[in-house]
């Protein structure tokens, strides 16, 4: 489906491995990143804060795409692993007095370690077992969040102190946005490069045909576990950023619904595609907001059935997911490629 | 001692309902290889529908029960035809996601129609007086639920072993292609599997509803079936029954023991999942599951 540009000849292996192939793409991506950094200067606080949540969702979605999209193992615990990251980060900062730049990766590692405990039994098996084990992890971790009062504050939740660099504290909407978007861009770059590495190719081999991969010398157990650990690490990072963003962490956020949202993101965006994770994160973050606005407006017009409309919000989400799976099974990333191809050849489509 | 005996008895009852719902799950998984995350919602829908019949329209119990069964058959047919049939041949993850989407649609329909309050059957399905069972006072609901589940499980065991449709279902489960080439209408078998699963779930929902009351939390009950099916072996029907019973008893016992000795509350909600992880560690294919041997 991808059409090469005129004059885009790849003559060396280095050329072939390039992520951003042509000068036009390099300029476009550069301009987009610049736009991301400049946009808070002109947009309202509401937009900036929505973009922060999108950036956090992008990190989480990239994580689940590594394990589900690239390695072919389904994870239903991304929400809970985010919770582990959020609580761990807050614990490291409040009790151990680590600075944020150290606490965040530590939270990611904690999350990866917890993930591996649940991933270990299922990495031996193929197919559904990781889905079911992570479902168990989701409920067990939720229970721990509610009952391990010393670390998580139980049902009350616990504050998450704002990160500080020297004397500068990240406590405004704008500074939080800059921190989050920087980490998100780093995550995108890391994932793209991970996929070009030996491990990334091993992941894809495991997904496409695990027996052939094993015969080729790919250690199935090692790479399944590794991809799951990477995914939980991303979740931990996303969780600690979420804690920073809200300033207060409560167990109620990290439910099975959150995990399902992340799975929906990569399915709607496109499995096994970095761009898809980004599209999915944007779509799934904006969809509930659009639904809230939409149902709110409808409820104002028809006050008598307001309750009915509000309760259908959840159902609309389900319907959208089902319709996407039936009519657009390859996700938004595929649609995006189609549109690009169309315009590249326009108006002479052959 | 009586305390523990009581725990075991209520655990067996709970387990027998797990077994029913797990049976539905295993039937769908076995013949269509779809992992149904909407099992709990099918259960909830049946329970609420029966509630509507009995309480709101004052239909006598026996008729309400039959109408509910007809309704769940219709629901299963609609779901299978509209949502699952287009997904045949899609990857596992898409199918899982579609059942998750289905579950949230069903849940929102239920909350839209019946609200979120806990509802109880009135008049109750079974007489309320307690009876003595080896020295332990037990409510009749428990006995009836256990009995009904046992009868249904036995009935389905016979159905799969001897009836023509049952044999066809087992053939479909073994291999869709082989079944097709032997002239078995695989699509009808898929629909039948969904119907059976929906009916046993609805009955399970009514039973659990007459013990605990009906609310939206019933949906989570469907997820708790996973430990039962993993213990029994994902694709084994007798395994689902035995797994359900064991998980039900273990859940109740661990809840009772941990609450009295350590003061941990609410462990009941997570205990089955802890077993699940332990089972995966020591016996990943379950008690009766088929160990997969693959060739290229």
Image: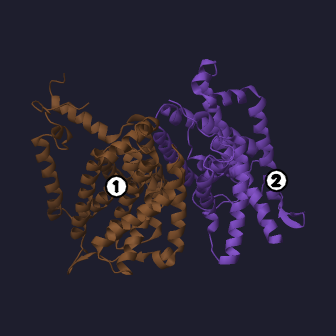
**Chain seen in purple:** B
Q: Is residue B289 left or right of residue A50?
A: right
Q: Which residue is mark 1?
A: A285
Residue A22 numbered mark, or none: none
Quadrant in the picture for the C terminus of chain A: top left
Q: Is residue A261 left or right of residue A62?
A: right
Question: In the figure, what tint was chain A given?
Answer: brown
Q: Is residue A231 left or right of residue A149?
A: left
What is the x, y in percent for residue A36? Answer: 18, 57
Residue placed at 31% from the left, 45% from the top?
A198
What is the x, y in percent for residue A319? Answer: 45, 44
What is the x, y in percent for residue A94? Answer: 37, 80
The quarter of the picture where residue A334 lies is top left
* B211 vs A78, nearest the viewer: A78
Residue A270 showing in the rendered view = no
Question: How was the colour assigned to the protein in this rendering?
Answer: by chain
In the structure shown, which secondary structural element does the residue marked by tag 1 occupy? helix
Chain hosting mark 1: A
Q: Is residue A175 left or right of residue B3?
A: left
Q: Which residue is mark 2?
A: B144
Quadrant in the picture for the N terminus of chain A: top left
């Amino acid at each position: 489906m991808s059409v090469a540009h005129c004059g885009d000849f790849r003559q060396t292996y280095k050329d072939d491995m390039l992520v951003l192939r042509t000068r036009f793409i390099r300029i476009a991506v550069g301009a987009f990143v610049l736009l991301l950094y400049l946009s808070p200067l002109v947009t309202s606080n509401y937009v900036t804060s929505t973009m922060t949540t999108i950036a956090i969702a992008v990190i989480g979605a990239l994580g689940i795409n590594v394990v589900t999209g690239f390695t072919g193992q389904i994870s239903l615990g991304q929400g809970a692993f985010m919770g582990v990251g959020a609580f761990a980060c807050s614990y490291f900062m409040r009790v151990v007095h680590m600075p944020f730049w150290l606490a965040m990766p530590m939270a990611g590692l904690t999350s990866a370690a917890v993930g591996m405990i649940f991933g270990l039994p299922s990495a031996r098996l193929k197919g559904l077992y990781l889905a079911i084990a992570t479902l168990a992890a989701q409920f067990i971790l939720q229970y721990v969040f509610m009952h391990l009062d010393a670390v998580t504050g139980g049902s009350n939740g616990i504050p998450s102190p704002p990160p500080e660099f020297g004397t500068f504290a990240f406590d405004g909407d704008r500074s939080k946005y800059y921190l989050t978007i920087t980490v998100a861009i780093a995550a995108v770059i890391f994932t793209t490069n991970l996929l070009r590495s030996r491990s990334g190719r091993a992941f894809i081999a495991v997904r496409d045909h695990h027996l052939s991969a094993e015969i080729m010398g790919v250690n199935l157990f090692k790479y399944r576990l590794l991809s799951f650990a990477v995914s939980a690490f991303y979740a931990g990072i996303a969780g600690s950023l979420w804690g920073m963003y809200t300033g207060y962490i409560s167990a109620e956020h990290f439910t099975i619904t959150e995990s399902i949202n992340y799975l929906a993101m990569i399915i709607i965006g496109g499995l096994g595609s970095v761009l898809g994770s980004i599209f999915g994160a944007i779509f799934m973050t904006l969809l509930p907001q659009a639904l809230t606005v939409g149902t709110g407006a409808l409820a104002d017009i028809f006050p008598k059935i307001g309750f009915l409309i509000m309760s259908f919000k959840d159902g609309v989400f389900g319907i959208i997911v089902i319709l996407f799976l039936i009519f657009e099974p390859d996700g938004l990333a595929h649609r995006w490629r189609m549109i690009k191809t169309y315009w590249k050849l326009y108006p002479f489509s052959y | 001692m009586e305390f523990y005996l009581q725990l075991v008895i209520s655990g067996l009852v709970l387990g027998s309902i797990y077994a029913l719902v797990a049976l539905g799950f295993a039937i769908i998984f076995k013949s269509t290889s779809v992992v149904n995350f909407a099992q709990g919602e099918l259960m909830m829908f049946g329970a609420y529908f029966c509630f509507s019949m009995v309480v709101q329209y004052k239909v006598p119990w026996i008729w309400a029960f039959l109408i509910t069964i007809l309704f769940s058959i219709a629901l299963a047919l609609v779901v299978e035809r509209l949502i699952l049939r287009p997904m045949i041949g899609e990857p596992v993850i898409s199918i899982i996601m579609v059942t998750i989407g289905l579950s949230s649609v069903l849940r929102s329909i239920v909350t839209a129609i019946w609200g979120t309050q806990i509802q109880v059957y009135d008049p109750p399905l079974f007489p309320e007086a307690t009876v003595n069972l080896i020295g332990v006072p037990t409510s009749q609901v428990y006995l009836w639920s256990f009995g009904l589940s046992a009868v249904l499980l036995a009935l389905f065991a016979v159905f799969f072993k001897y009836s023509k449709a049952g044999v066809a279902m087992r053939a479909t489960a073994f291999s869709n292609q082989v079944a097709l080439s032997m002239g078995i209408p695989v699509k009808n078998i898929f629909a039948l599997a969904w119907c059976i699963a929906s009916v046993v779930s609805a009955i399970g929902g009514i039973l659990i509803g007459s013990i605990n009351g009906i609310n939206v939390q019933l949906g989570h009950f469907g997820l708790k079936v996973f430990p039962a099916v993993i213990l029994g072996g994902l694709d084994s029907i007798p395994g689902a029954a035995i797994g359900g019973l064991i998980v039900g008893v273990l859940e109740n016992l661990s809840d009772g023991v941990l609450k009295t000795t350590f003061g941990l509350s609410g462990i009941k909600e997570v205990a089955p999942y802890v077993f699940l992880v332990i089972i995966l560690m020591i016996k990943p294919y379950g008690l009766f599951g088929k160990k997969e041997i693959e060739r290229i």
